[in-house]
Amino acid sequence: MAGSTYGTLFRVTTWGESHGKAIGVVVDGCPAGLPLTEEDIQPFMDRRKPGQSRYTTKRAESDQIEILSGTFEGRTTGTPISMMVHNTDQHSRDYSAIMDKYRPGHADYGFDQKYGFRDYRGGGRSSGRETIGRVAAGAIASLLLKKLGISITTYIRQIGPIAIQSFDAQEIFRNRLYMPDAGAAQKAAAYLESCMAEKNSSGAMIECIVKGMPAGAGEPVFDKLDAELAKAMFSIGTIKGVEIGDGFRVVETTGAENNDAFTIDANGKITKKTNHAGGILGGISDGSDIVIRCASKPTPSIARPQQTVTRGGEKVEIEIHGRHDPIVAPRAVVVVESMTAITLTDLLLRGMSSRLDNVKQIWHR
Amino acid sequence: MAGSTYGTLFRVTTWGESHGKAIGVVVDGCPAGLPLTEEDIQPFMDRRKPGQSRYTTKRAESDQIEILSGTFEGRTTGTPISMMVHNTDQHSRDYSAIMDKYRPGHADYGFDQKYGFRDYRGGGRSSGRETIGRVAAGAIASLLLKKLGISITTYIRQIGPIAIQSFDAQEIFRNRLYMPDAGAAQKAAAYLESCMAEKNSSGAMIECIVKGMPAGAGEPVFDKLDAELAKAMFSIGTIKGVEIGDGFRVVETTGAENNDAFTIDANGKITKKTNHAGGILGGISDGSDIVIRCASKPTPSIARPQQTVTRGGEKVEIEIHGRHDPIVAPRAVVVVESMTAITLTDLLLRGMSSRLDNVKQIWHR
Amino acid sequence: MAGSTYGTLFRVTTWGESHGKAIGVVVDGCPAGLPLTEEDIQPFMDRRKPGQSRYTTKRAESDQIEILSGTFEGRTTGTPISMMVHNTDQHSRDYSAIMDKYRPGHADYGFDQKYGFRDYRGGGRSSGRETIGRVAAGAIASLLLKKLGISITTYIRQIGPIAIQSFDAQEIFRNRLYMPDAGAAQKAAAYLESCMAEKNSSGAMIECIVKGMPAGAGEPVFDKLDAELAKAMFSIGTIKGVEIGDGFRVVETTGAENNDAFTIDANGKITKKTNHAGGILGGISDGSDIVIRCASKPTPSIARPQQTVTRGGEKVEIEIHGRHDPIVAPRAVVVVESMTAITLTDLLLRGMSSRLDNVKQIWHR
Amino acid sequence: MAGSTYGTLFRVTTWGESHGKAIGVVVDGCPAGLPLTEEDIQPFMDRRKPGQSRYTTKRAESDQIEILSGTFEGRTTGTPISMMVHNTDQHSRDYSAIMDKYRPGHADYGFDQKYGFRDYRGGGRSSGRETIGRVAAGAIASLLLKKLGISITTYIRQIGPIAIQSFDAQEIFRNRLYMPDAGAAQKAAAYLESCMAEKNSSGAMIECIVKGMPAGAGEPVFDKLDAELAKAMFSIGTIKGVEIGDGFRVVETTGAENNDAFTIDANGKITKKTNHAGGILGGISDGSDIVIRCASKPTPSIARPQQTVTRGGEKVEIEIHGRHDPIVAPRAVVVVESMTAITLTDLLLRGMSSRLDNVKQIWHR
């Protein structure tokens, strides 16, 4: 029970269902003094908003974020920040065709087994709309990280068989698939058209790079930085695999190849010659870029007939109509970035008391 | 701070360093009434004990587990179970050659950055010996799961380039590499010999299968079953990638391929025709086998010269001698299984209150 | 940081300031299947609503609760229940007279020291209006407890020097001071009139009795039932003392007087002859009535001139005008009851897994 | 379940039963760099050790603390500090006379109801010996607080009807009753003799004063400083009432009397003219002395015959022989001090991230 809260000191609680009145989030533990208005948050919301392209749902939601508490005169006060988005376009349609059928690839069956019944309209709590709260919270975390010189870049590395061949950070926001390679984006778009034509959907790989992360964050032994990041990523419904740094490639490498040699950079700072570790050693940030890769599964809602069963245990066919994306990943990009920002912020706050000297610095008045 | 505790209701706290007096664990929240003696736990300890083969460290530790509290007349009492293993073979040798040098691929640099200094003898808290406590706790969790009809099988699927070609569960415990394919185990042994000859080490892939898991465990939205499992896996120092079910293969699949159709089995029970999801849908167990795969990096301690720097910021060479395994994975197999067992147990206990009917059943006296 | 969440499995997160847009709460971990509508909750809200009598603030708030998520077809779904009340009567007045002055007996100085600045309009987060969220959550907990046969009665035992001389449960809701003794209520009303005439305020003692609590709830050793209840009570701003059972009277008693003898009741059930312990032994409920007493301090906002200082460190006089109650306790009665209900519910859910037999009962399908 | 851990960032987990092999504690989250050896901790242990006077149990335990992990070269490393005391004098005697009888005033019945059975030898987990771990952890917290200029004084204010009439801090450690008034201590000793002669026991009031606490610690709204302290106190088995500052005296006071006026002290620092609030306003420390008072119940184990029942539901008499103190409070003094120190340390660490400026100070490298 009670799995809707994430984080220890920077604590995020989301609430709301796809077809309820609203979706929201409470962010508790945000340090006081961070400049914050709705205008700062809305651009993050817009990145996951539906209806942005042919490949995202046509559901017409403006997803305007409203701050209800926790700021005063344009700054955070240290008290909980409550934010909300109203659901405006939940069609009041007939659910009788699907209410008793378990949609393959969805959480329906698990929810029924766990709770005894469920809100069968559009996924309820397991809908992607739940991530609205995460993105609003992630926006705050991102703004806070920026104040510490930390930035995050997230993009799609591969869609179905189409992987990027080059990297241009500017390009990421130029195409609707958030790919850093214009050519790949074009091919991927064509691939998605073919999926749609076949009433099918596609998986993808999302990559997230953190720059400027100071060394020393992460809590051995269970709350390692990579452990918390992995949990954060897998808490996103669509994610089925996570890698840090070289990830699964370490299976076939050797220690001599995989170890990153330490050296001294031009500014006299300790750094690593390579970054197979993806910026995390022993669960603690090492000052290099943090590199996370996630596998996003194909949208389970597809319009072709599928075999399934009813609640009552009868074999039936199901066809899922409605406003479904042929790919989840483009809208998940900002969710991955948000969960990364929230996790880093939480571990940075938790790490403040790691040394007696730091404690003295803050409290010896 | 305070990252040495794992779990919400079944809560595991480990302590101890590789070269301290002892290594231990406190398990709090274990239900009362579980038969438990040291003899029940020792077989799990023996699976990670050093000195079992050519490919594991020669450190001579008996790793005899001692229960200090929490049982009475052979059963758990519901109070914290404290368990300990004495460190008996920590060589009192000269560390001056490595105490100021950051070992590549190790946590040394991060620890210094985080805490200001560290116990430089053999890895201290980031040593693999910390996992002793996890295995003792995992043994208890495994015994509890067995009472619920849940069993876990863990093995090595691949070592360097050598992947298994067949699966024989009996074979897993017949070879020292815990591979379910005798032929692959033989080839892998030869491969490890060549690594050792070159003062090198190898990565590997570990797979873990859970059978008998009831549907309905896992807490949406952040404490999903897969999210908690991923954190558990990444909390093991050697793990750099985690997959559930098809994992990264979903990137190139389509919804039509990846969705698992529901059907009715011979006993009239709802089941899935395929298991691409790896037993978890929407973060909740679906009653199918849970399938977890982890990438284990090559042992970072290798005897060949490597480039690094000192605490003081001087470039130096380092050669790491001592008793190091050419591969971490065989001893990590039981750690993966233990963290899986702990995670499942915690989520099963947490899930008991998901329905009002269950609450009434327990408390309406 | 992050102190706005209460509870482990039945988890309550409140948000909102007295002069912000709204006040709200998220209840996560409520078991699925509890009948719940806004009509079930509103009566609890009405008990703490302002403007009910001469002794409560004239602020004109309707405090209509709105459920935003977590229910479907009139029952809880197991997902987070978000509830909100809009602030409709926050006067937009001139705060320049008090914004820089620390009000004696208030949290102003502490907030400034902690966060660097604060929302100076009407107490911000430390306002009594924050408790709206607690009462909405407490209503849900109370409804759940009722399903288990547990009921809570809360009332005022003493106002200033006027203590109750008799107990009539029906009387509690007949007078606006929630005293179970009509005569005492009348005298207390006269006493409060004299306080108001002198621009002064009064303290009070609140008592809370829980009937029907099963034996066996509470988690040794830190999360004892009385420890959690004491935290719950002291988390209410006005409370300065808490007693369980005989409380401070134990100082002057002896073991022979204070020990409650066990006996067998008419139904053959084990019970206690007396209840000095107040229903809790060793931190675990013993099946007797739980008895809690709390000391509520006089309203700190009084209209007479008081000495204080400014943020800048200048000595000044302050006079606090506005809509303030001459006594906090009548409106705190339902808050005490709510925090009690939330605490009991959380510990009942936590206690479900105390025995292996219970775990098997729920999960062995 | 899982109630043996206390604290969020400075996290204390105790384990062990009175008649098990050992009693211990794990302290996780202690900042690195604090000088710490067994010699620093032992004086705290000696204050709660049995056999110190006629009024404490004759059980002959040396209670020598052993540090098993978490320090290196005489300083804390930031990793968990495991400490243990062996039980050396647990008499292996015949428990058949009490094993099935519920001792009045003890936790026996509750444990049986909760867990289904219990370790019936000497109280098991609910024994006062469990507090050994708290005192060892409290010693570390006290040493850390000292580095921040914070000190704690704890003593007995009243025993039965004998209250102190004067206060001499030096006297506290001169008499075995830890009373700051030699005359009262003498009278109290005589009173305890009379209790013992009558096979009876006495209650007491313990007072704890914290000096040097900086303003700004405590987490609104649930984790208020006073709320956490109250939980800490009530988690000690013998405590039945807690007051902060004026405590229950606020019931009969008025706002004009109870409000503490702010003023400027000789050093130009903001301070309060009085301290009715006991150093905490709105749940946040205000820089004044923190004042806590606790009611300690009489020892429930008394040698005179008492009525009770057996597990099987039979009415019987019980006489509790053995080595029992006629008063719990003298040995509880250091437990109250320890729980206070642990609570303050945890809230100081949690409060470090309350302002963005503090976060920047620690992390902007």
Image (tube, coloured by chain):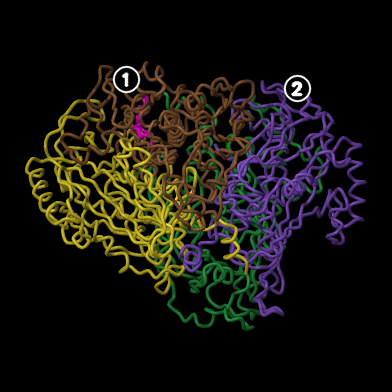
Chain colours: A brown, B yellow, C purple, D green
| x, y percent for residue C231 | 63, 50
Asked if the magenta segment contains residue A211, the reply would be: yes
| Residue in front for this viewpoint, C63 or D124 | C63
In the rendered structure, the answer to whether residue A86 lies left or right of residue A305 reads right
- The x and y percentages for residue C273 are 71, 74
Per the image, the residue denoted by label 2 is C95
Q: Image quadrant for the N terminus of chain B?
A: top left
How many numbered marks are there? 2
Q: Position of residue B321 (x, y in %)?
A: 14, 43
Amino acid at pointer 2: Tyr
What label sits on residue A181 in the rendered view? 1
How many C-alpha atoms fall within 10 Å of the one at disc 1: few (<14), some, or many (≥20)?
Answer: many
Nearer to us: label 2 or label 1: 1
Q: Residue under mark 2: which chain is it in? A: C
From the viewer's side, name the closer residue of B360 and D199: B360
Residue A36, x across and y down, in percent? 57, 22
CA separation in Å, label 2 and label 1 = 55 Å
Tell me the tag on residue A341: none
Determine the secondary structure under disc 1.
Answer: loop
